[in-house]
Image: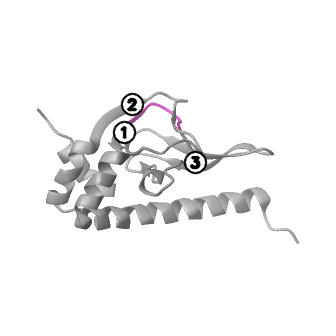
Amino acid sequence: METLEPILAEHPFFKGMPPELLKLLVGCASNVKFEAGDFISREGQEASEFFIIRQGKVALELFSPTHGAITVETLEDGDVTGWSWLLPPYRSHFDARAVDLTRAIRFDGKCMRAKLEEDHNLGYEMLKRFVRIIAERLSATRIQLLDIYGTRV
């Protein structure tokens, strides 16, 4: 039976991760597919997973009562969506919607949290990788808000 380990090892998010740590993650992973328009996560709902995108596009959106859905960032092959599974209260901060057919690898959040608690080296490796993603999302959100609201003089 073929495992997802070689696919994970080649994904940009896991690039350079020691093989012994990568091996620990495989048990939490599974292949998934989303059709265009499918919601992968909804803002405010329980965040119990994250996804590495293998193929396709995913729009990260915020809802504004005055502007409707605002795309903060569009993710593509090699990107990651979902970091809210890592921090209590485990609620999604964005809607994530497949723009077109999207193939991804899903990681179960409870399984991942258990592995990160069990092996602090793995926890540190993953935290370093997710902090970068959180910072990128914050920056993308800031840029979108500046585009929408601009500066008032």
Most extreme residue toward the bottom, as rendered? 153
- Residue 108 lies left or right of residue 99; in this view the side is left
Left or right side of 28 for 20: left
In the image as oriented, which residue stretches furthest toward the right? 153
Local crowd size for mark 1, using a 10 Å CA cut-off: few (<14), some (14–19), many (≥20): many
Residue 104 marker: 1
Q: Please state if 31 lies on the left or on the right of 137 as rendered.
A: left
Label 1, secondary structure: give it: strand
Quarter containing the C terminus: bottom right
* Magenta-drawn segment: 97-105
**Disc 1/disc 2 C-alpha distance (Å):** 6 Å
Vertical side of 133 occupied by 65: above or below: above
- Residue 33 is marked as 2
Label 3 – label 1 distance at C-alpha: 18 Å
Residue type marked 3: Phe
Residue that badge 3 annotates: 94
Query: Marks 1 and 3: in contact by CB < 8 Å?
Result: no
Q: Label 2 sits on what residue type?
A: Lys
- Lower sequence index among marks 3 and 2: 2
Picture coordinates of residue 22, whole percent (x, y) = 20, 55
Q: Position of residue 7 (x, y in %)?
A: 23, 45
- Amino acid beneath label 1: Ala
Determine whether, in the image, residue 64 is placed left or right of residue 85: right
